[in-house]
Image (spheres, rainbow, N blue to C red):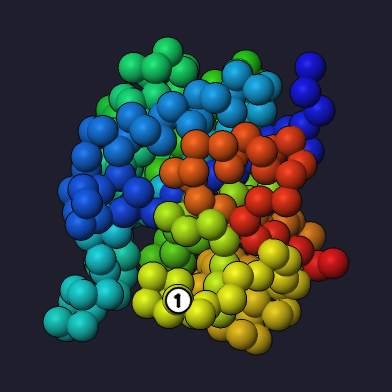
């Protein structure tokens, strides 16, 4: 059996990961591609929990810029994360991966309420757990929800899944001279204002010594190799 570096992970996905080529809506083929990656990880014996954003369905900032109440805009985003969670659950179960969706906002007809011990028990039974509804509170991002849930379930790492192979000092799609970081400390990440996760999430991880690994989920080998201890992507930690 292969030796794993991480045995329990919290996978943070952006809503755009489920979107079309333009990042909008829910593309079943994109959901299926993610499901196949998650299935491979489960078959390695890794416990998997997922937090997904809502940027493909709703961007609260746009509503706020037009005068919408911040709390209302955030609650709409939380509801959109549950829609994404259900779409990803359907894709996972089509791959025969038993999955449970738990929501921080109670909606018993479509998802379990978030209960920490139940989530841990699901993972112990080999199920993937998707956390929807953010933290259940406005003014907090899904990045913060990911950091919080990762600590609650005692995850070994938060894996921030992106469409690039790590963290750069500028956008590599715009600047061909952008420099990739292999490792960063939490303080460096905050001081440089690098777009890894928001500052609240990074601070939570720093206070609890929870590493953050940023990698390209759509590289077919990246996630597996990272779990086996290879240096993939960018690792943010205290070292």
Instruction: Residue lying at the far top in this picture: please name it.
Output: 96
Q: Position of residue 206 (x, y in %)?
A: 74, 67
Q: In this orientation, does residue 54 appear?
A: yes
Q: Is residue 101 above or below residue 135?
A: above
Q: In this orientation, does residue 114 appear?
A: no
Q: Nearer the viewer, residue 173 or 52?
A: 173
Q: Is residue 9 above or below residue 194?
A: above
**Residue drawn at 63 percent across, 80 percent down:** 190
Q: Is residue 169 above or below residue 100?
A: below
Instruction: Residue lying at the far right in this picture: please name it.
Output: 239
Direction from residue 132 to residue 6 in the image, left or right: right
**Residue drawn at 31 percent across, 70 percent down:** 71
- Give the residue at mark 1: 176
Q: Is residue 150 above or below residue 93?
A: below
Direction from residue 119 to residue 93 in the image, left or right: left
Quadrant position of the C terminus in the picture: bottom right
- Which image quadrant for residue 31? top left
**Residue drawn at 73 percent across, 56 percent down:** 210
Instruction: Residue lying at the far left in this picture: please name it.
Output: 66
**Residue drawn at 75 percent across, 72 percent down:** 185
- Which image quadrant for residue 11? top right
Q: Nearer the viewer, residue 46 or 234?
A: 234
Q: Position of residue 175 (x, y in %)?
A: 43, 79
């Amino acid at each position: 059996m292969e030796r794993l570096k991480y045995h329990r992970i919290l996978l943070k996905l952006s809503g755009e990961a489920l979107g079309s080529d333009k990042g909008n809506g829910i593309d079943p083929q994109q959901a299926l591609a993610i499901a196949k990656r998650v299935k491979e990880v489960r078959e390695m014996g890794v416990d998997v929990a997922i937090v997904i954003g809502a940027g493909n369905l709703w961007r609260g900032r746009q509503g706020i810029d037009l005068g919408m109440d911040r709390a209302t805009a955030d609650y709409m985003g939380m509801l959109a994360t549950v829609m994404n969670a259900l779409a990803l659950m359907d894709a996972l179960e089509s791959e025969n991966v038993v999955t449970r969706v738990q929501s921080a906002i109670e909606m018993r007809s479509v998802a379990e309420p978030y209960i920490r011990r139940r989530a841990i028990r699901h993972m112990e039974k080999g199920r993937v757990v998707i956390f929807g509804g953010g933290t259940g509170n406005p003014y907090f991002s899904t990045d913060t929800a990911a950091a919080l849930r990762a600590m609650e379930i005692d995850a070994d790492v938060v894996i921030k899944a992106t469409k690039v192979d790590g963290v750069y000092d500028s956008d590599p799609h715009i600047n061909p001279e952008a420099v990739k970081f292999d490792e960063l400390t939490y303080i460096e990440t905050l001081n440089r204002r690098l777009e890894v996760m928001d500052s609240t999430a990074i601070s939570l991880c720093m206070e609890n010594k929870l590493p953050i690994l940023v990698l390209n989920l759509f590289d077919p080998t990246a996630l597996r190799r990272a779990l086996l201890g290879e240096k993939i992507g960018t690792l943010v930690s205290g070292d």
